[in-house]
Amino acid sequence: MQRLPIARRTRPGGLAVAGALLTVLAMFFGVSGASAQVPSAPSNVEGKTFTIGTDTTFAPFEFRDSSGELVGIDMDIIRAVAKSQGFTVQIKSLGFAAALQALSSKQVDGVIAAMSITDERKKVYDFSDPYFDSGVQMAVAKDNTDIKGYADLKGKTVTAKTGSEGESFAQSIAGRYGFTVKPLDQSATMYELVKSGNAAAVFDDYPVLAYGVSQNNGLKTVTKKEAGGSYGFAVNKGQNAELMAAFNTGLAELKDNGQYQAILDKYLKSPQDTVSADSSFWALLVSSMPALLKGLQNTVVVTLISFAFAMLLGLFFGFLKVSHNIVSRGVATTFVNIFRGTPLLVQAFFFYFGLPQIIGQPVNIWVAGVLTLSLNSAAYVTEIVRGGIQSVDPGQLEASRSLGLGYGTSMRRVVVPQAFKIMTPALINQLVILLKDSSLLLAIGFAELLYQGQQIYSNNFRISETLLIVAAMYFIVIMILTKLSNIVDKRFNK
Amino acid sequence: MSEQAHPARPGENSGSTDPGSKISVRGLKKSFGTNEVLKGIDVEVADGEVVCVIGPSGSGKSTFLRCLNKLEDITAGSVLVGGIDLTEPKVDLNKVRQQIGMVFQHFNLFPHMTVLENITLAPVELKKQTKEQARQSGMDLLKRVGLEEKADARPASLSGGQKQRVAIARALAMNPGIMLFDEATSALDPEMVGEVLQVIRDLAAVGMTMVVVTHEMGFAREVADRVIFMADGVICEQGSPEEIFSHAQQSRLQDFLAKVL
Ligand SMILES: Nc1ncnc2c1ncn2[C@@H]1O[C@H](COP(=O)(O)OP(=O)(O)OP(=O)(O)O)[C@@H](O)[C@H]1O
Ligand SMILES: [Mg+2]
């Protein structure tokens, strides 16, 4: 919900920018962005597997329950449709904009992400029949008994998300009912404002509000929803026609047999068991730990693998940097400049969304993550290695060479061991930075620790407590890592 | 050994090479950028000869010495060691350097290795000896410089004089035919100079060919077969210790000696 859910459904601007960026990158690498796609012959979908992209967290449409399972209206519908039509789906939880980028780069076959059907989007995508009718609704604090309708808002202040349908609806009736609208960027802030009494009401998307209320977020609805846009399942225009046909057939079946209504009720009516009676910090800690530990494991594994590659690459380029050959030095300097001179996030997006367009096939998220972190970190390790080698007294190399030992042997036996001793603190520091930077991979939907934390707090609304737990876990792991590194350092550099 | 035939003074025999020469330097020039540090050096060092190089600071003594094992690139001229021209592009420098031991003013011991490892590194890496043989001959070398009990110590725990004796043992490990010393005692406390000079003296006694850059005039007088006085990148004067120290010809040498003696 902290991803501006409404804005994303009404304004395709972000996608256009991302698409343009990818096109520019593709041109930069001398490759046409328009890769030839073999049109899949419309045939039966039975037995096939489709990869479906979705948002990371947009309750109640897609989010992770306390066991870490991806659930929600979108998830239940696509899975139910798949089951009834006899195909299997592989869900990729990427983030809204990222899912659409993945669709463009053919990393996924379709996207279901509470996306409203707009004329502009229809130019790029084929949409299914609408599977959800959204709309704007008003909510007030749970214990508020004064406000029963728009008329009670006279002279008061309400809030809504900046640029959203909720805001435009609120503005449209503000004059008639005599209230003022204070737009905010964050859902959590809006709700806090209402609960604290600083705003009388909030205008937000009906499903979001309904789900929040069902989760005891401290609000209640007192008016009916205002009719609004409809959500659809999307594929690239002119592609995957058989998948689209199957979705529509399946959806119609679900509506007929009542499964569809059951799914909606599950998320929008009945209170969820996730917010159980026990709302203590301890209960949160226990219930969130499995998912967080899974995330922590991914964080540590991706960090260690990336660091190993970063060391190898950094040593290689570091040696090039101190070599006497001007071409080698130029190669190493270029490498460092590219990966130190561009943001990590751009690199992550490039490897995950851009690279597939260039090579014409999907890139595994682990590969993209490790590529990003190891190349970025290798640029810094290169400089550490260069500095380390150059800080070793040149007399050491001379003494070794004067004995008749070659350059390679002299470096290996004499210079590098001493350089390592000098470099160790900086390398440990780099490892810690790498581990912290790995949290940025959540932007491409890599299920690391912070990503898992986001999934949890967008589900239970306990942002500060969840983030504290996540921060504590990072802190503990970094402490352990630092201690271990220091022990290793003492062992080898005694 | 003191009855060696001394090669002629600079300029006098630029043509032929004494076949007995271990080192033969002709027309050696060395520039750092535009700064010409060696301006044409001609010198022959015979087998078993001990040549001491003296001269004021900045005159190019170290640079000259470092050209003899090509730690410095040579700008012009030639340097022949054991008949091999180091300025030839194809020459295997590592092979040649195994024939030349070098001792530095600041020892340049490898601090991450024990004393014995410092000595055995080259023989083992270059597959001249097995680990066991290298250890054995390393211990022999340490005995020779009087430091066998320090075999497993780290260089950091040694005194300056001990460090330099280890450095000499290390330089001897490849069994070189030539030893180069660049102010081996200049960084030492005065009470430690003697022990290092004694080791060099012992080497002279067994007939090692040596080029010794030194500020120890007494030592040069005692050990050298020939003394070379360098100034401003040229050999200004050379001769037997007697000739140099007692019958200096040129005023520059006389001035220099007046300052240091
Ligand atoms: N690597 C270098 N780059 C530039 N100039 C150098 C370099 N090494 C030496 N020189 C210069 O060459 C000249 C001769 O230096 P060198 O060290 O050979 O003198 P030296 O006779 O050994 O002096 P000292 O008695 O002080 O050791 C000096 O002017 C010095 O500044
Ligand atoms: Mg010098």
Image: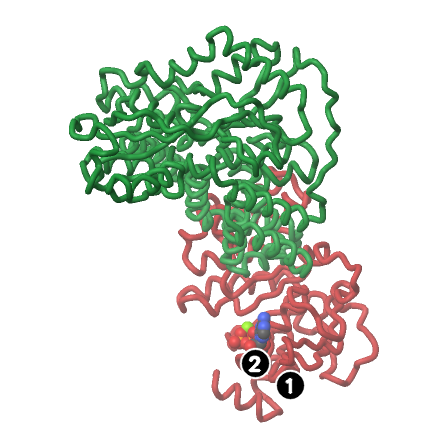
Chain colours: A green, B red
Mark 2 sits on what residue?
Answer: B55
Query: Is the residue at mark 2 in contact range of ligand 1, meaning its CB lies under 8 Å from it?
Result: yes
Q: Name the residue: 22% across, 39% down.
A: A199
What residue type is disc 2 on? Gly
Find the residue positioned furthest to the bottom: B251
What residue type is disc 1 on? Cys
Query: Which percent across, then down, holds residue B55?
Result: 56, 81
Q: Is label 2 in contact with label 1 (beta carbons under 8 Å)? A: yes
A243 vs A9, left or right, is right
A230 vs B8, left or right, is left
Please tell me whether residue A193 is drawn above or below residue B113 in the rendered image: above
Q: Depth check: B94 or B246 in front?
A: B94
Find the residue positioned furthest to the front: A176
Query: Which percent across, then down, holds residue B116?
Result: 52, 46
Q: Which of marks 2 and 1 is nearer the N terminus?
A: 2
B195 vs A90, left or right, is left
**Res B199 seen here:** yes
**Which of the 4 image quadrants contains residue B20?**
bottom right
Q: Residue B236 carries which label?
A: 1
